[in-house]
Amino acid sequence: MSTATHSTQTGSCQCGAVSYNLTGTPLSSFLCHCTNCRKFTGSTYQANAMYAGRDSLVVTKGKDNLSVCAYNNTTSGNTIRRHFCKTCGSPLFIYPDANAGIVVVMSGGLDDPAAFAPTRECFVKDRLAWVTPIEAAQFETVQSLPRK
Ligand SMILES: [Zn+2]
Ligand SMILES: [Zn+2]
């Protein structure tokens, strides 16, 4: 069984115009139930892997095909910059302005997302009533970023 504890992972958008390598050990893998994530993904929550060091993620194809949108209507109040594919719209990764050393990768874009089992759930007060909590996860009412 593969794990997310080491080595390089690969990922891409849905249409394949953008692909990337992800190296290192995630600080955490988590589900986010906030409204911003729900609206952006068009789904019930967003699955994420958070890495220390923005050079953990290297775009290997289609860097010019990325769009970036800054959002400051987040539940935490922090501005985040969402990167997504211009062609297919797939959400790929986030740069949070509150910590320039962090990159948050949307786990569903990884080629082996099974290796990124979530251990935390964030903004659980916004979790939809019919979504089953993950038994082993820690629950947080807010998303905490590591200090700079
Ligand atoms: Zn695409
Ligand atoms: Zn969120």
Image: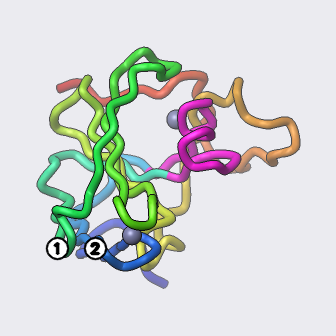
Q: Is residue 69 above or below residue 41?
A: above
The CA span between labels 1 and 2 is: 6 Å
Give coordinates of residue 51: x percent, y percent. Answer: 28, 50
Quadrant containing ligand 1: bottom left
Amino acid carrying label 2: it is Ser
Q: Residue at x 36, y 61 (%)?
A: 85
Q: Which residue is mark 1?
A: 60
Residue occupying the point 29% across, 44% down: 68
Residue type, mark 1 in image: Thr
Res 59 → quadrant = bottom left
Percent position of residue 126, x then y? 70, 28
Q: Are marks 1 and 2 in contact (CB under 8 Å)?
A: yes
Q: What residue lies at 57% left-to-right and 49% top-to-bottom?
A: 41
Q: Which residue is mark 2?
A: 19
Extent of the magenta region: 29-47
Does residue 85 sit above or below 101 in this rendering? Answer: below
Asked whether 41 falls inside the magenta stretch, the response is: yes
Other-residue count near label 1 (Cα within 10 Å), few / some / many at <14 / 14–19 / ≥20: few
Q: Is residue 66 rendered to the left or right of residue 138?
A: left
